[in-house]
Amino acid sequence: MTTLSPTLRRISILATDKVFASTLMQAKDFFHLAALRHSLQLDQGLKPAFDILLCSPDGHPVDTFSGVRVDVDGGLGDTDVIILPAFWESFEKLLERYPQVVPWLQAQHARGAVFCGEASGVFWLAEAGLLDDREATTYWRFFDSFSQRFPKVKLNPDKHLTDAGNLYCAAGMTSASDLYIHLIERFCGLRVAQGVARDILFEVQRNYSPGRIGFGGQKLHHDPAILQIQHWLEDHYSEKFRFEDVARDHGMSIRNFMRRFHTATGDKPLHYLQRLRIETARGLLSTTRRSVKAISYEVGYDDASFFARLFRQHTGLTPTPTASN
């Protein structure tokens, strides 16, 4: 099970004028609850295990989209995770008003920070050049303007979440919720993530399957045929198929396919498929009330006992629905 990284001490949430207060506080609430839960898990009482700070470029309060003035904890500084909430303002105006943001993002990237952009917040990542030649997504209303402004970014309009190696993008509030749960699991462990999901998601309805994050780094290769197969697996992971047929349909022998897949991703195809199914199941366990048997069937396993053994093998945990925690 993933434990808290010793380098995670601070999460900074960027607050600017015209930010959506709901997305600003969404991130604050998710990570504050995680910090409290993780502290309890570490027997440290109710003192948050890490800091979650609202940061404005000049350290002054900001006027949100709805006119609510929000006080902040300070200005821009060194941090481990940066959240870039959605805003409703001309991006050109924000750039002119806050010229210090882009250099700050670049400096924090050089330090190894993790980034999360939500909807229009993704524009900040792209403007800093961090998404050049990388996959990204944003809210559908911004597809055209984003593509025109940032032609080097590989915008994927079919995805609600993308992971380009510590550069995460979420299309909107619901997908941002899943992204935050994923990061909480990454830094605080599955139990804390499940607890936060149970306490805060309140019957969130999705038109996509959560739990698809975590494979972005394995797509940063130069084999387009294997990348196409990876995308095919994301769409068909729950179906019954033979890799021999997948290889043939993509113009490869099974031997050539196995070799190229491992070279490109560092994973064997079967192990990759298992991880894809298990990660999807983890998301469903955290965000739905379905039984283990139902989730097992949904991700492609008819035998719930086999699924449970495989889940333990990959995660070191027993699959437990959130509703029963």
Image (spheres, rainbow, N blue to C red):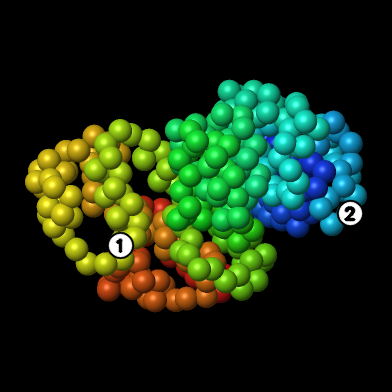
Name the residue located 42 percent from the left edge and 43 percent from the top edge. Answer: 216
Mark 2 crowd level (few <14, some 14–19, many ≥20, 10 Å Cα) = few
Q: In this view, does 257 lie to the left or right of 281?
A: left
Amino acid type, mark 2: Val
Residue 302, position in %: x, y?
A: 27, 73
Name the residue located 9 percent from the left edge and 46 percent from the top edge. Answer: 253
Q: Is mark 2 on a helix, strand or loop?
A: loop
* Residues at circles 1 and 2 in contact by the CB criterion of under 8 Å: no
Foreground: 297 or 59?
Answer: 59
Residue 104, position in %: x, y?
A: 69, 26
Residue 212, position in %: x, y?
A: 44, 55
Foreground: 312 or 284?
Answer: 284
Q: Earlier in the sequence, mark 1 or mark 2?
A: 2
Amino acid type, mark 1: His
Locate residue 202: give its quadrant: bottom right
Vertical relation: 147 (above or below) 212: above
Mark 1 crowd level (few <14, some 14–19, many ≥20, 10 Å Cα) = some
Name the mark on residue 236: 1
Write down the residue under mark 2.
68
Name the residue located 66 percent from the left edge and 44 percent from the top edge. Answer: 121
Name the residue located 60 percent from the left edge and 61 percent from the top edge. Answer: 174
